[in-house]
Each structure stands twice: as structure tokens, then as C-alpha cells.
Image (cartoon, rainbow, N blue to C red):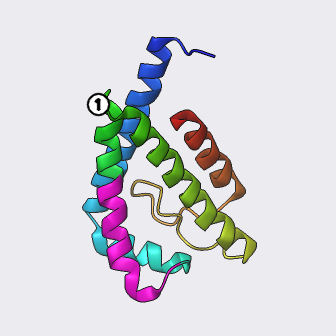
Amino acid sequence: MLIDPAISEAICFSLALLLAASAAHKARAPREIAGVVRNYRVAPEGMSALIAAAVIALEGALAIGILVAATRSVAAIGAALLFVGYGAAIGVNLKRGRTEIDCGCSFGRAGERLTAGLLGRNALLAAAAL
């Protein structure tokens, strides 16, 4: 099934804008983002700062990649995988009963907690990227 080019472009632009805004927000507070990564408890604690930096760089690169026609497909798959990864980290913590931690996805509204709705949001974003 083909998607109308205008709809496809709107989705690409929206995803790129979301990823760029997220990377910019995280880049302004890298220590805070490293703390969010640490709170998820899905990676060794000593890796939190490195993972946070990698996420910031990846979100920025994917935002640019989605806007460039030659790299759009690869970047869109990368974005979908990133959203699935975020969903997996949220799902693991929901399963553990750890709903009190900050999701790290609230653009400055400190303390947005983990909910099942975030799983749906990440699934929708992954589907949009694909």
C-alpha cells in the first residue's frame, strides 16, 4: 500500500522534529538524563553517562537522517528501533512495579511517571516511523 506523499512527508517531518527536540532537550541536561538512564536499571550503572550521550547523539542523527531522502529509510528503521527500545525499558520497569521513576520523556515536566500509555505511545511512534 502506498501512502500519499504529503502524508509521508508530514510524518517524516513530525518524527524528525520530535527527535531533534528530544535530543536538544537532553543535551541541555546530560547529567539529569544519565540519572534517568540509571533509574531505569536496565544497564550497568557505570554506563549511564555513556548511554545518555549515545542516546542524545542517536536522536540527533536520526532526526537529520529522516529529513534526507537518501537516508530516510535507514533512519526511519533506526527511529522505530529506538522507540521500541524505549518501550522495552518502560515495559521492564512496569513489570517490576517501578512506576514511580521519571520516564525521561516529558520535555521538562519533571516527574512524569511510567504508565502503560507510554507503551502505546512508543508503539504508535514506531509504527509511524515504519
Tell me the quadrant of the picture where the C terminus can be found: top right
Magenta stretch: includes residue 108: no
Magenta stretch in the rendered image:
43-58
Magenta region, main secondary structure: helix
Residue 41 position in % (x across, y down) = 55, 81
Residue 33 sits in quarter? bottom left
In the displayed structure image, the side of residue 61 where residue 73 appears, left or right: right
Tell me the quadrant of the picture where the N terminus can be found: top right
Residue 128 position in % (x across, y down) = 55, 34
Is 55 placed above or below 92 here? above
**Rendered residue at 45%/87% (across/down):** 45
Is 97 placed above or below 54 here? below
Residue 85 sits in quarter? bottom right
**Rendered residue at 47%/86% (across/down):** 44
Classify mark 1: helix, strand or loop.
Answer: loop
Residue 40 position in % (x across, y down) = 54, 75
**Rendered residue at 54%/59% (across/down):** 86
Q: Which residue is labeled 1 in the image? A: 68
Is 27 placed above or below 1 here? below
Residue 112 position in % (x across, y down) = 54, 61
Say which amino acid is labelled 1.
Val
**Rendered residue at 33%/65% (across/down):** 54
Residue 124 sits in quarter? top right
Magenta stretch: includes residue 54: yes
Which residue is at the front of the view, 126 or 105? Answer: 126
